[in-house]
Amino acid sequence: MLDFGGADISKFAVQLAAKQFKAASYSVASAANLPYRDGSFDVVLDIFAPYSLPEVHRCLKSEGIFLLVGPGREHLSELAGLVYDSVNSHKGNPVKQDDSILLSPIFQRRVTEQQTIAGEQILNLLMMTPYYWSISEDKKQQINSLTSLNVTLDFELQVFKK
């Protein structure tokens, strides 16, 4: 059995993780087809990434835990307002279950706070979001010229048990 493993579709992300935590096993893989045996993990953690509930369920041990972290309704809404003419609230990261795959919710919490981001960290933050791939060059330059930006960090934490 694995003590610790990780998978990401990004080869770059897997390489970074492997440099930081050498004792773990990492794979470049899709969430829809995880390269782990049935019942490999006590805990599966998903942070702001697509996931496949059947794959999570398959990889968890019989009493395993699934921790899911996704965006709350207002996550980075100020940054989104600089990118888009009209901003829609996030819909969160709902877990859609069916009768064949059942995980019991055991904990849910929304965590929200305000942060001021300054200087080059503003562009770094933008680059970590999907907004970066749809922004015009004009708006990117406008954001890059900001000296500071107040943003809302809004996270939905959910914990499920198999």
Image (cartoon, grey):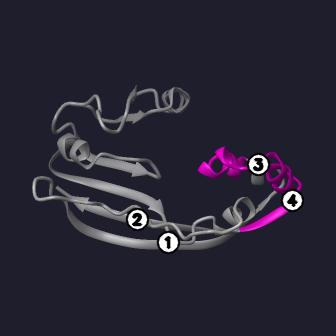
Residue 35 locus on image (x, y percent): 28, 28
Question: Which amino acid type is marked by label 4?
Answer: Leu
In this figure, what is the number of numbered marks? Answer: 4
Q: Is residue 26 above or below residue 70?
A: above
* Residue closer to the observer: 1 or 97: 97
Q: Secondary structure at mark 4?
A: loop
Q: CA distance from mark 1 to mark 2?
A: 8 Å
Residue placed under numbered mark 2 in the picture: 157
Q: Decide whether residue 98 is among the magenta residues.
A: no
Per the rendered image, the range of residues in magenta is 124-150
**Marks 2/3: CA distance?**
32 Å
Disc 3 designates what residue?
136
Which circle's residue, 1 or 2, is located before the other in the chain?
A: 1
Gap in angstroms between the C-alphas marked 1 and 3: 31 Å
Q: Is residue 77 left or right of residue 66?
A: right
Residue corresponding to mark 4: 146
Residue 111 circle label: 1
Could you tell me the amino acid type at mark 1? Val
Q: Amino acid at mark 3?
A: Ser
Of residues 2 and 77, the one drawn nearer to the viewer in this rendering? 77
**The disc label shown at residue 19, or none:** none
Q: Nearer the viewer, mark 2 or mark 4?
A: 4
Q: Of marks 4 and 3, which one's residue comes earlier in the chain?
A: 3
Q: Is residue 44 above or below residue 87?
A: above
The quadrant the C terminus occupies is: bottom left
Q: Amino acid at mark 2?
A: Leu
Vertical arrangement, residue 24 with respect to residue 90, above or below: above
Q: Nearer the viewer, mark 4 or mark 3?
A: 3
10 Å neighbourhood of mark 1: few (<14), some, or many (≥20)? Answer: few
Marks 4 and 3, Cα distance to the nearest angstrom?
16 Å
